[in-house]
Structures are given as structure tokens and as C-alpha cells.
Amino acid sequence: MPRILVVEDDAAARLFFEHILLYAGNEVDSIGTMSGGADLLRSRRYDLVLSDVKLPDGNGLEIADLAGEKGTKALMITGHAFTLPPRWSDASGRVKPGNDGGSR
């Protein structure tokens, strides 16, 4: 059974990933900080690390580097990949009603 480490500071996202991965038949460890993820990665063997890029105590890319040193694959995720153009969002960055990208 594959063992996966999830490093995600958003508790709801972390729980979502955990449930999906467990349902798919994987063993899952999860943690919300880069330092905690690095400690787990150093002390256990994982088949995959799924890590947020932006963590409260550092850059998740450091987790990917550590995983690579151990021969473990890493998949990076982020909620900060891009911002919507002004015509699609209001001042807070939320999608304006009617601009959800769907056809009308």
C-alpha cells in the first residue's frame, strides 16, 4: 500500500486530501508545517509527498528538495498560482457574479 505525506497548512484542504487519498487505499500522514513535514520525511519512507508551496514556516519547495534527496516523488500544490484579471473579480479578488467562466 503506497504511503503518502501531505503537507498543507489549510486544515480543510489537508483533511480533504487525506480523505481522498485514504479512500483510494493509501496510507496517509499529514501535517501543517514545513518543519513538521521535513521531520516526518526524514524519519519515515514515503512513496509520494503532496505539499503546499506556501507554508507558514517556509517554502514547501524545500520539502520537494528533501523528498528528491530521499528518492521520493513530490507533487506541489498552491492556491496562489494566479490572480484573476480585474474584469473577472472585484477588489477583494472574488469572482464577480456572472463571471464564473461558464457560457450563458
Image: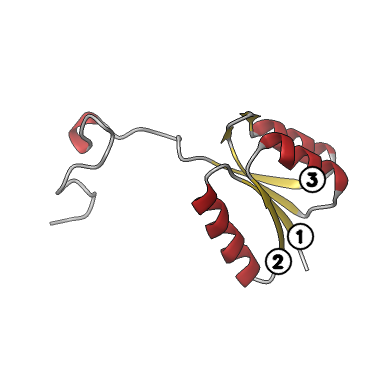
Inspect the image, locate mark 3, and give the three-letter code of the amino acid beneath it: Leu
In front: mark 3 or mark 2? Answer: 3
Q: Residue at x 80, y 44 (%)?
A: 41
Q: Tag 3, which secondary structure?
A: helix
**Residue placed most toward the observer, 63 or 10:** 10
Inspect the image, locate mark 2, and give the three-letter code of the amino acid beneath it: Asn
Label 3 to label 1: alpha-carbon separation: 12 Å
* Label disc, if present, on residue 40 of the rendered structure: 3
Place of residue 49 in the rendered image (x, y in percent of width and height, measured from the top left): 70, 48
Q: Residue 53: which quarter of the image? A: top right
Label 2 to label 1: alpha-carbon separation: 6 Å
Place of residue 66 in the rendered image (x, y in percent of width and height, measured from the top left): 78, 36
**On screen, residue 39 above or below 59:** below
Q: Quadrant of the C terminus?
A: bottom left
Q: Quadrant of the N terminus?
A: bottom right
Place of residue 28 in the rendered image (x, y in percent of width and height, measured from the top left): 70, 60
Place of residue 87 in the rendered image (x, y in percent of width and height, measured from the top left): 18, 33
Q: Which one is earlier in the sequence, the residue at label 2 or at label 1? A: 1
* Label disc, if present, on residue 82 of the rendered structure: none
Give the number of callouts. 3
Q: Label 2: few (<14), some or many (≥20) within 10 Å?
A: some
In front: mark 3 or mark 1? Answer: 3
**On screen, residue 1 above or below 18:** below
Residue under pointer 1: 3
Q: Which one is earlier in the sequence, the residue at label 3 or at label 1? A: 1
Confirm or deny contact between disc 2 and disc 1 (CB under 8 A).
Answer: yes
Q: Residue at x 67, y 52 (%)?
A: 30
Q: Tag 1, which secondary structure?
A: strand
Inspect the image, locate mark 1, and give the three-letter code of the amino acid beneath it: Arg
